[in-house]
Amino acid sequence: MGSSPHIVVVGGGSTGTGITRDLAMRGFDVTLVEQGNLTHGTTGRMHGLLHSGGRYAVSDRASARECIAENRVLREIAAHCVEMTGGLFVKRPEDGEAYFEGKLDGCRACDIPASVISGEEARAMEPHLARDVEKAITVPDGAVDPFRLVVANAADARDRGARIETHSTVTDLLVEAGEVVGVEVEHEAGPGERVHGVEGGREEIRADHVVNATGAWAGRIGAMAGVDIEVRPSKGVMTVMNVRQVDTVLNRCRPKGDADVIVPHETTVILGTTDEEVDDPEDYPEEQWEVDAVIDTLASLVPMLRDARTIRSFWGVRPLYEPPDVGSDAPTDITRDFFLLDHAERDGLPGLTSIVGGKFTTYRLMAERVADHVCGRFGVDADCRTADVPLPGSEDFSVLRDYMDEFGLRSPVGRRSVERLGSRADDVLDVDGPNPTVCECEAVTRAEIRDAIEGSGSDLNAVRIRTRASMGNCQGGFCCHRMASELHGTYDEPVVREAWDELLAERWKGQRHALWGRQLSQAMLNYALHATTQNRDRDPADAGPVDYAAFDDGPTRAGGPAGADVAADGGQNGN
Amino acid sequence: MAIDSAVLVIGGGLAGLTSALAAARAGGDVRLVSAKQSTLRNASGLVDVLGYAPDGTGPLIDPFEAITSLPEGHPYRTVGVDAVREALALFDEVTDYCGGHTDRNALVPTHGGTVKPTARYPRGVAAGLASDDRDALLVGFESLLDFDAPLAADPLRAAGVPFGVRGVTVGFPGDLRADAKVTRYAKLLDVNDEVGANGRSRAARAALAAAVEPHLDGEPRVGFPAVLGDDRPGEVRRTLGEMLGVDVFEVPTGPPSLPGLRLEDALFAALDAAGASIETGNPVVDFEGEGRVEAVYVEKNGARIPYTADQYVLATGGLVGKGVESDREGVSEPVFDCHVPHPADRYDWFDEDAFGDHAFAGFGLRTDAQLRPLTAEGTVEFDNLRAAGAVLGGYDFPAEKSGSGVSLATGYAAGWAATQEAR
Ligand SMILES: Cc1cc2nc3c(=O)[nH]c(=O)nc-3n(C[C@H](O)[C@H](O)[C@H](O)COP(=O)(O)OP(=O)(O)OC[C@H]3O[C@@H](n4cnc5c(N)ncnc54)[C@H](O)[C@@H]3O)c2cc1C
Ligand SMILES: Cc1cc2nc3c(=O)[nH]c(=O)nc-3n(C[C@H](O)[C@H](O)[C@H](O)COP(=O)(O)OP(=O)(O)OC[C@H]3O[C@@H](n4cnc5c(N)ncnc54)[C@H](O)[C@@H]3O)c2cc1C
């Protein structure tokens, strides 16, 4: 690939990794640079709804059409990342009839399969639906796992020769003679996968073209070369419940507003969301009222949610963009459409293209547009194939065999592993030696953890998002130390300890918004496990020296070995 | 006719058991009712008294000395250091624990590779103490995830322990499933069944010793995860020790925690021997009375059965044991609705840091000098109700390392006082 143009893509979310894969498939030499983990940004903090387009069918039909088309594509190319749950737009007595009719017409106009069912039929599908729900529209909404999908895109791009740099921040754009010619990067831990404690460094990466796919951060990258990109970041909360109260995506059928969607996701359901403009995509208040609002509002659809157990809440920021001349007041009014900004044409700055706005569901289409644009710029004649070539893990997903026997896994564990790994299951699970379950809540085995470590270095948060380990009910209480153990062997103890502490801190962060009821009890149990059983809060290896000789050295040190003290074994010998 | 006793203890954890035992030993007519298994199932089975001062100073060498400088309102201050000593004496008498020969704390290696100060430890842990300067080999099992011996050995070295320590991982003999529960390991060693290992069949303990033997490099003591027998831990340890020519010890692991479960069994047996009535499996759901508890109701198969007593002890545990509950609006005690002080805003219940100063860790009842719960106004809730153990507030046991010690001391004091006062 020596002579093919070198493209640097900034941003390891769905958009950036999608672009990287597409460009790599079209023969470009690509480097992806991401400041955190893959999915560190909005992609790792979204609702997980694979839109049918129904949500936009009244107000924004162009987006609705894109959604249904991409929804169909992703079911094919990313089968192991998608669960086709189906969705309902649910009408309560106080929701307008005209809007309901408008939603139905809109879906039909946009080629979204939709039909009306009665309240009874809806409750037969979802028994916990409120008794006064009158009727509903069925649509092909689904649930999608953003982590798995992004990792699959990156893995495929890497297989096709792309270089993927995580934990590497673009600190400047290199501009020479009025043209962007590369980026300056600060590596947290040297190039390659991240290992704790490894010295970082600076690197200048020169490129024939730079793609800015940094979502809510796009304005900052633009500013490095003096161009204005008017992103309007808008935050939203998502609250994770401990069980799947519903198996179908539930949308409230009324004009777009706060707290109107419930998405089943793996073992949980996720409630969302709010929509509040913020100044800084990395530093914004995470507020209690938002959590209370989603629970209380969505309880009008599913009453049992009011007192159900939540395991954590998290926030994301939408990378909304609006062309300078529009000037919407409320973030809900800003379009969900995406925009390709050709800075050569727009600002007279060649060498840089930005992609802003959009949705996760349409990431592939956004990537295709960017790749088409880059091809045009370099006169490369190559068709986009990302709508046809399945992602790794989804190549041969129809042949689900009985993995339980094959990999010696108990059935629910085996099924979950295979769902996550798709067609990679054979490669990953076929290991020598025992394969115990590391994370019981999410049924993640040692083999999957080790596979993830191979892909992401000593970063346990990256292992977490690849496998879902520590993301279930106990929020890592029972498995953080086990995940850390799996690092040992490849990495030294200080690296392991640092990665472990970092994982504990990350797990704590999201739980804080769920600390009442059973999750508060869980937090106390976890605190006791980590601080009392493990004494991790006062690790003597971190604190000062201990005067060991001053402490009790055992009852029988003078008299003889304690283990051989027969008489002292009391009645416990049993014979 | 209600079921009647002089003293009724509600809750069968460390505090309830100690309370009932103290009352029965003092000649009281005692009944204990408990809903479920206690926190001991999750706990390490070590009995910490006080490992660190509330300001983090430590590890403390002498916990008893430090008790006197604890803040007002700490349960140890309420019952006093003598009650702590008496409770431990009773505990030492009915269990096979060590530590009673000295006032000094012991430092026990944890499964996470730290050391933890504790006052009483099971005999099976004794040969593992960190102040013992003999070299140690730690042995983990391939599919037992909670104890990674090599990973535990490294930080112990980093913590400067006065002995050489290495960790190895071996396959556990036999064909236990990859995610077999710890009780399966323990049973196999208890029963000492024949297992297949390296193409031939031999008794489980011998097979385990044979798997460890080649890794020994002169270490006089060998540590295993706490799975060495459920019913016969002493015997399992001794046979393994004899075969290997070393002292064998356990490193506490869990949950589920075998040392905790063994302790629970020992205390139930002692309570039974002391003549108390014991009923487990059904929760107390309600009560009757104002200013004085007249009766409580136990739910059995959907029916509500009244139980009466002259004196009551509430030992239902904390947030973990379900003796303290919360919802988005507040924190409460579910049986008698006793007052639980807590900040009004639930975002003040926790600290930003995972190991910060969490208000929730101290949630629980405040009492008068006789352990009687107090209302928000500071008056006694019920004349004949005392509280003990984790249902009490005002101490952060994970940070202090004081959990079991507080349950023992307050349980003992409440049980003893209840018997004295009963008609
Ligand atoms: C609350 C919420 C719910 C949502 N729900 C859904 C949904 O259910 N369905 C759906 O389809 N869409 C949903 N979306 C929208 C969707 O999540 C986003 O549109 C999409 O994830 C954006 O992806 P991206 O790759 O463009 O941006 P990001 O994922 O934010 O990626 C940008 C990346 O750039 C990196 N970066 C920034 N600056 C630098 C730098 N200087 N150097 C290196 N890297 C840098 C960031 O770390 C980040 O990882 C939701 C959004 C929000 C906020
Ligand atoms: C993970 C963990 C590790 C720990 N490690 C240590 C350690 O290493 N060292 C140490 O000293 N301490 C440790 N502790 C602390 C110690 O175990 C506890 O403080 C102690 O066991 C609490 O005992 P308790 O009797 O007060 O409460 P619990 O053990 O919680 O017992 C409460 C009992 O009351 C019953 N109950 C509850 N409600 C009702 C009702 N309505 N009716 C009837 N019965 C009811 C419950 O079923 C239970 O049996 C640990 C705790 C945890 C959680």
Image: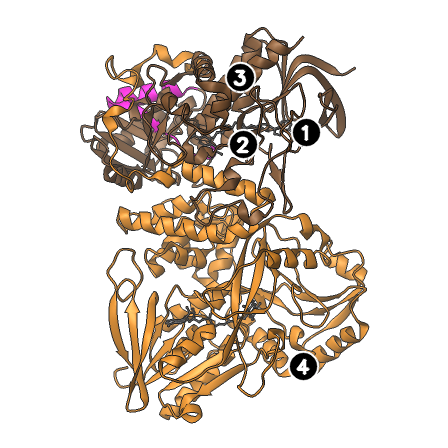
Chain colours: A orange, B brown
**Label 2 sits on what residue type?**
Gly
Q: Position of residue A197 (x, y in %)?
A: 26, 55
Dot 1 falls on a residue whose secondary structure is loop
As displayed, is residue A332 above or below residue A516?
Answer: below
Q: Position of residue B316 (x, y in %)?
A: 59, 28
Dot 2 falls on a residue whose secondary structure is loop
**Label 3 sits on what residue type?**
Ala
Mark toward the viewer: 1 or 4: 1
Q: CA distance from mark 2 to mark 3?
A: 16 Å
Q: Residue B393, labelled with which disc?
A: 2
Q: Is mark 4 within 8 Å of ligand 1?
A: no
Q: Are marks 3 and 4 on the same chain?
A: no
Q: Is mark 2 within 8 Å of ligand 2?
A: no
Q: Are marks 1 and 4 on the same chain?
A: no
**Subunit bearing disc 2:** B
Mark 4, residue position:
A110
Q: Position of residue B254 (x, y in %)?
A: 44, 34
**Subunit bearing disc 4:** A
* Mark 2: few/some/many CA within 10 Å (<14, 14-19, 20+): many
Q: Residue B413, labelled with which disc?
A: 3
Mark toward the viewer: 4 or 2: 2
Q: CA distance from mark 3 to mark 4?
A: 74 Å
Q: CA distance from mark 4 to mark 2?
A: 60 Å
Res. A260 visible in picture: yes
